[in-house]
Amino acid sequence: VCTMSATTTAAAMYTAAEVEAKMDMLKDTLMEAIDANAAATSALASDANMGWLVICGAMVFFMQIGFGMLEAGAIARKNVQNILFKNFLDASGAAICFWLLGYGFAYGDTVGGFIGNSNFGIRDIYNGNGGEGASDGWEGWFFQWAFTGAAATIVAGSVAERCKIEAYFVYSMFISTFIYPVVVHWVWGSGYLSAWGAVPDEDGNARPIFNYNDSSNGVIDFAGSGVVHMVGGVSGMMGAIALGPRKGRFDSVTGTTNAMPAHNQALCALGTGILWFGWYGFNCGSTLAIAGAGNLAAKVAANTTISAAAAVITGTFVSKFTEGHWDLSLAMNSILAGLVGITAPCSVVDPWHAFLIGISSAIVYIGAHYLLLKVKIDDPLDAAAVHGATGAWGLLCVGIFCTDANVQYAAYPNVNDACGRGEQFGVQVVGMLAICTWTAATAGIVFFGIKYTMGLRVSDEAEAVGMDISEHGGDGFADVDEIKARAAAMPQRALAPAAYDSYSAPQQPPQAQPNQQQPNMNYPQGAPQYAPVYPPGQPMYGYGGR
């Protein structure tokens, strides 16, 4: 009775209007809390997405180390410093060029669907640009720069062991500033091949080829089989053509190919493993977000793994058939081929498609490898075969294996049946041909332009002695005492015992001062004593570079 009395008394203290006002106040407080929670959740999702791109971008940048180790192991030991130097130049030059011009060409406002023309020097990215809790855009530039560096570094393998470093620097700047960004604009920006399209419909909405409406998807290249790898591979092939083969690679009389095996397979294996690891940042990071896209990123990771695994198994057995033994180099490059081949379709295919893509990518790579040798194109790292040929195949695999349900699951903007009715394959063919033509033409102009102006290739003497000595002042593997002994015995760095080259016909070596300080060193019979030589059974400095 006392409780009921107290409750009745308390209720009597408020009028109906006061109760309604308090309820409104409580409602407003509750709504403010809901809005604050939504804003906090949105900011958290935005932070997660930005962090995702930064981490994945760092993984893609780590691939530069993978490329460096792979290239350092695959080439001559006398050129290791040179190839590593070029790797750092690629990453650094790409950062400056992509910041100043490349990013604007790639993602700026479109000019006729061909090239962007705004946001140069990323001037449209600044503190607070995105508003409270939203992205300002820094992470987008960082992620895309890492891709730019990868495209540029691919070329280093094709022109290794005979390209002037200053000439390579010029080309590296050009691909990072213009060749690659234009292709990015076409496919990933608002260019004419883009899934978002550059040609507006009657309502002003951008629409993709072929039909310029929502019944078409445009070119699908999820993470860059064509945009990154094909551009790098085709550019490398043009560089290899302009330079010509390494001395002794092809017999001048019989035309046969002389083997130039990797000097350090351990470095090659390390580099390949790093590249495989970094590829998860490359492909999974191309979701461009993790909040709401976690399932897609995981699916991409699964497909990437299956393709790479299928490719290396295929390449291993094919190499046994073609070479007569289990060839580690072909097997490792088959891993990369499987990764390149799945890069474009990884989000729009099922796992069994990824398995078939891996198998076919290894076969495409190995076929391209032998074709390049047949036509006497010397690519020390097989970059044109791994990245160029297999990159083109990856674009085509989208049209062959994609399903409309997977395209929609991957969040492409238009809902249609372009895969089911075969249109997507035609679009992919157009995209592949456009990228190949553009890259071959522009890279050819640059490489041959350099060749006939400032010069593209080092001298025969510098190539024989090795670019570490001729360009960088020392051997990357020699100890201090050995370097001093060589310097004393070789007053002119460019001199090298060309007769020691195991991959070319013996030549009369250039004249040099006999080595009187080392009378007891073990020299090959009849060879002039230029410098200390390694003990029997060990490779000599300058011995074919290996």
Image: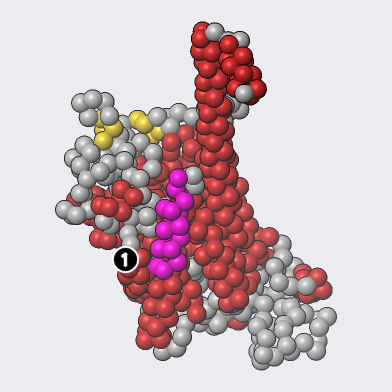
User: Which residue is drawn at the image coordinates 48% and 41% (left, top)?
Assistant: 177
Q: Which residue is mark 1?
A: 353
Task: Give the residue at x 70% y 68%.
Answer: 475
Residue 370: quadrant of the picture: bottom left
- Specify the quadrant of the image occupied by residue 524: bottom right
Q: Which residues are magenta?
A: 292-307
The image quarter containing residue 482 is bottom right
Nearer to the camera, 200 or 465: 200
- Image quadrant occupied by the C terminus: bottom right
Q: Is residue 136 visible?
A: no
What main secondary structure does the magenta stretch of the protein show?
helix
- For the residue marked with disc 1, what is the amino acid? His
Whether residue 47 is in magenta: the answer is: no
In the image, 354: left or right of 497?
left
At horizontal 46% and vertical 85% (from top left) the residue drawn is 326
The answer to whether residue 476 is above or below residue 409 is below
Residue 420 at x, y percent in the picture: 19, 54
Asked whether, in this view, residue 389 is left or right of residue 269, the answer is: left
